[in-house]
Amino acid sequence: MLRRYARTGYRWERFTAPATRREEAIAWAAARLEKGLPLIGWDMRLHDFAVVYGIDRGGRAFLVDDRVSGQTGDVAPWDSWPSEAVGRIDLFAPVEPVEDDPAGAIVDSLA
């Protein structure tokens, strides 16, 4: 997945773990969000990806942009993340710009 994300022009890092490591994941995410870096998160409110753009420590929630943000707002409470059905945390953060080899990208996309 990280190799595919690198095609966006950035190197990415990933935090993936079982739901039991939620507090560690929140700290990992907060360190990046407080530097102004957005994240991509799985299962924030839906079984889908969302852009995580902020943190509300007092409200114990992330601020996200996903398919339901327009109808329900941007708050994704920590106590319901990840869902019991998924039970896994998956977060991605951009690290630094990278230059992708166009020929390599074509070969990788065929794999």
Image (cartoon, rainbow, N blue to C red):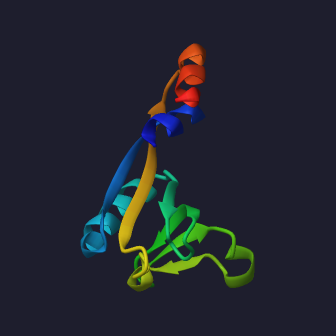
> Residue at (44%, 52%) from the top-left corner?
92
Q: Quadrant of residue 95?
A: top left
Q: Residue furthest front?
A: 111
Residue 67: horizontal and vertical position, in percent? 69, 70
Residue 56: horizontal and vertical position, in percent? 46, 76
Q: Can I make out residue 34 in this image?
A: no
Q: Is residue 79 above or below residue 48?
A: below
Looking at the image, which is closer to me, 92 or 87?
87
> Residue at (58%, 14%) from the top-left corner?
103
Residue 24: horizontal and vertical position, in percent? 26, 66
Q: Is residue 40 above or below residue 62?
A: above
Q: Is residue 90 above or below residue 64?
A: above
How many discs mark residues in the rendered view? 0
> Residue at (57%, 74%) from the top-left corner?
46
Residue 90: horizontal and vertical position, in percent? 40, 60
Q: Can I make out residue 83 in this image?
A: yes
Residue 77 lies left or right of residue 7; in this view the side is left
Q: Residue furthest right?
A: 70
Q: Is residue 32 above or below residue 8?
A: below
Looking at the image, which is closer to me, 50 or 56?
50
Residue 69 lies left or right of residue 63; in this view the side is right
